[in-house]
C-alpha cells in the first residue's frame, strides 16, 4: 500500500449554515451549526485515507481542547498521528465558516493560533518510504525543510498552493506536483489570465506536474508543452468548503494509481464535485469504488 505523509494547517472548523450570507450589523437565525476538523492538508489526507491509501500526519499541534479534537478526528479517519508533536500553552488554528444555502458559497473567518513554525521539532524520518509528501504552504519554514528532506529521500513533493504566504517562493522550486488555485497562479506571476499564469509557473519552476484549479470553470494543466483544459462537473453545490482540499487528495490518489494527468484532473474534479453535494469537508461516504464511479459518470 502506498504511503502519503502530510504537513500543514490543521484547523477546527465551526460550520454555520444560513439561508444566505448575513448583511452587516444585523441578526440572523442559523439553520445548523457543526464542528469538525479542517485545513487543506488535513482534509486531503482524509480523502486519501477513504480512498484506501496509508496516510500519516506530521507537524505540530496545540495541547488545547481544539487540538485534542483535531487529532482525535484524524485518528478516527485512520490517519497516523504518532509522529506529531504537541505544544503546551499554544492555541490551535480555528475557523468559523459561514455557508450560504442560497448561493452554495462559503466565507471563512479564521485565527491561525500560536503553534510555532519550528523546523527543529518535525519528525522528518516519517517521510521515509512515502510516495508523496503533501504540503499547503502553512508553517513555511517547516514545509521547506520537509520538502528538502523528501527530495533527498526520493519522495515526491505535492503542494496545495492556495495562498501567497511569505516565503512561498523558497518552497516552489522543491515541488514536483504543483496545484495552485487560479488566484494564486495569477497573483504570483502577475498574469491576467490562468493559461498565461500556468505557462509562467512552468517556465519558472519546472514541476513534474502542473495543474491550476479554477472552481466551476474546471481548470488547466500542462502537458507536452501545451496548456490543456479540464471541465468541472455540473452540480448544484450545497457546500464548497473543502472542495479544493478534496481535489488535491483525490488527485494524489489517482496519481498513485498511475493515471495520466488528464485522468487525474477528471478524477479529482469529479470527487471534489461530489464533496460539494454534502455539508462539511469530511462527513460523507467515499471509497475508491464510489470515486471511480463518479469518474465514469463524468466521462459519460
Image: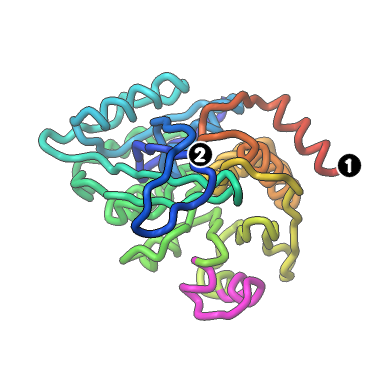
Q: Would you say residue 192 sits in the magenta stretch?
A: yes
Q: Is residue 165 left or right of residue 18?
A: left
Question: Residue 36 location, x and y as percent?
Answer: 40, 31
As helix, strand or loop, the secondary structure at mark 2 comes to helix
- Whether residue 152 is visible to the viewer of this picture, yes or no, is yes
Q: As rendered, which of 86 and 15 lies closer to the eye?
A: 15
In percent of the image, x 52 and y 49: which residue is there?
20
Q: Which residue is mark 2?
A: 44
The residue stretch that appears in magenta: 184-200
Quadrant showing the N terminus: top right
Above or below 295: residue 174: below
Which residue, as the protein is rendered here, is positioned at the far right?
300
Q: How many numbered markers are drawn?
A: 2
Task: Using the image, determine if residue 175 lies above or below residue 129.
Answer: below
Q: Are marks 2 and 1 in contact (CB under 8 Å)?
A: no
Tag 1 residue:
300
Density class for disc 1 (Cα within 10 Å; few <14, some 14-19, many ≥20) is: few
Mark 2 nearby-residue class (10 Å; few <14, some 14–19, many ≥20): many
What x and y, as percent, mark residue 26?
37, 53
Locate residue 179: give its quadrant: bottom right
Amino acid at each position: 500500500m502506498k504511503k502519503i505523509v502530510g504537513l500543514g494547517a490543521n484547523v477546527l472548523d465551526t460550520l454555520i449554515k444560513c439561508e444566505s450570507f448575513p448583511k452587516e450589523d444585523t441578526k440572523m437565525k442559523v439553520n445548523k451549526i457543526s464542528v469538525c476538523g479542517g485545513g487543506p492538508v488535513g482534509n486531503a489526507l482524509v480523502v486519501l485515507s477513504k480512498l484506501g491509501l496509508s496516510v500519516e500526519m506530521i507537524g505540530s499541534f496545540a495541547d488545547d481542547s481544539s487540538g485534542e479534537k483535531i487529532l482525535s478526528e484524524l485518528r478516527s479517519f485512520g490517519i497516523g498521528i504518532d509522529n506529531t508533536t504537541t505544544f503546551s500553552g499554544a492555541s490551535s488554528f480555528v475557523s468559523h465558516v459561514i455557508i450560504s444555502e442560497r448561493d452554495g458559497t462559503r466565507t471563512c473567518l479564521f485565527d491561525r493560533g500560536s503553534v510555532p513554525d519550528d523546523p527543529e521539532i518535525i519528525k522528518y524520518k516519517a517521510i521515509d518510504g512515502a510516495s508523496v509528501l503533501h504540503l499547503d504552504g502553512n508553517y513555511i519554514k517547516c514545509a521547506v525543510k520537509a520538502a528538502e528532506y523528501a527530495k533527498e529521500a526520493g519522495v515526491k513533493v505535492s503542494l496545495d498552493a492556495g495562498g501567497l504566504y511569505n516565503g512561498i517562493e523558497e518552497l516552489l522550486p522543491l515541488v514536483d506536483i504543483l496545484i495552485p488555485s487560479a488566484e494564486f497562479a495569477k497573483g504570483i506571476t502577475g498574469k491576467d489570465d490562468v493559461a498565461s499564469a500556468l505557462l509562467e509557473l512552468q517556465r519558472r519552476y519546472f514541476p513534474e506536474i502542473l495543474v491550476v484549479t479554477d472552481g466551476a470553470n474546471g481548470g488547466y494543466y500542462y502537458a507536452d508543452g501545451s496548456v490543456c483544459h479540464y471541465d468541472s462537473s455540473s452540480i448544484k453545490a450545497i457546500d464548497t468548503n473543502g472542495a479544493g482540499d478534496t481535489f488535491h487528495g483525490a488527485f494524489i490518489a489517482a496519481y498513485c494509481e498511475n493515471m495520466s494527468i488528464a485522468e487525474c484532473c477528471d478524477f479529482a474534479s469529479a470527487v471534489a464535485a461530489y464533496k460539494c453535494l454534502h455539508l462539511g469537508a469530511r462527513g460523507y461516504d467515499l471509497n475508491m469504488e464510489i470515486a471511480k464511479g463518479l469518474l465514469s459518470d463524468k466521462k459519460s
